[in-house]
């Protein structure tokens, strides 16, 4: 049975000095939030963490954004305000992670009849 087959949705925002990424629950939740701002941000984002990619695009390694980086780009270091700006101006991206195949329990050793 394949394992690890899951979808990953994120919003990529290309800033003037850095690229920012936030993880979202799904693309539909973001679109619903854009149409109805009464939906809580907690129902849209997967976690209140903003990542930077150091201008390497949305597909590379992520580091957590510092308060100084957020202040320089968005004029505030409050993460919820920055997330709103990223959701408004960023591009939605959805990817499927590849499924993994292989043995399920390597510790059982060879199974032979005795």
Image (cartoon, helix red, strand yellow):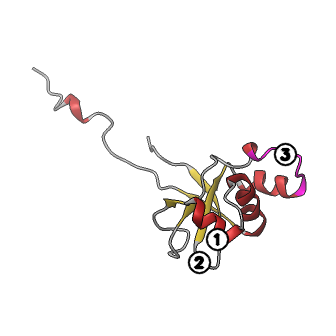
The residue to which callout 1 is attached is 72
Q: Is residue 13 visible?
A: no
Which residue lies at the image location 58% right of the left edge and 64% below the top edge? Answer: 68
Marks 2, 1: nearer the viewer: 1
Instruction: Please state if 84 lies on the left or on the right of 60 as rendered.
Output: right
* Residue contact between numbered discs 2 and 1, judged by CB atoms under 8 Å: yes
Decide whether residue 33 is among the magenta residues. Answer: no
Q: What is the chief secondary structure element of the magenta stretch? A: loop
Which residue lies at the image location 47% right of the left edge and 46% below the top edge? Answer: 4
| Residues shaded magenta | 35-41
Q: Position of residue 81 (x, y in %)?
A: 75, 56
Q: Which mark is residue 39?
A: 3
The residue sitting at the bottom extreme is 16
Instruction: Please state if 6 lies on the left or on the right of 36 as rendered.
Output: left
The residue to which callout 2 is attached is 17
Image: 92 above or below 102: below
Regarding mark 3 in the picture, which secondary structure is present there? loop
Which residue lies at the image location 59% right of the left edge and 52% below the top edge? Answer: 7
* Along the viewing direction, whichever of 109 and 47 lies nearer the viewer: 47
Image: 62 above or below 32: below
Cα distance in 3D space between marks 2 and 3: 30 Å
Regarding mark 1 in the picture, which secondary structure is present there? helix
The residue sitting at the left extreme is 114
Instruction: Please state if 31 lies on the left or on the right of 100 as rendered.
Output: right
Quadrant assignment, res 1: top left
Q: Is residue 76 visible?
A: yes
Q: Position of residue 87 (x, y in %)?
A: 74, 61
């Amino acid at each position: 049975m394949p394992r690890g087959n899951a979808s990953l949705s994120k919003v990529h925002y290309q800033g003037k000095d850095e690229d920012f990424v936030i993880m979202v629950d799904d693309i539909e939740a973001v679109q619903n939030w854009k149409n109805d701002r009464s939906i809580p941000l907690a129902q849209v984002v997967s976690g209140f963490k903003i990542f930077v990619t150091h201008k390497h695009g949305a597909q590379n390694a992520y580091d957590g954004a510092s308060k100084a980086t957020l202040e320089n780009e968005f004029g505030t270091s409050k993460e919820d305000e920055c997330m709103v700006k990223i959701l408004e101006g960023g591009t939605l991206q959805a990817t499927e992670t590849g499924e993994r195949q292989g043995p399920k329990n390597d510790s059982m050793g060879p199974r032979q009849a005795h």
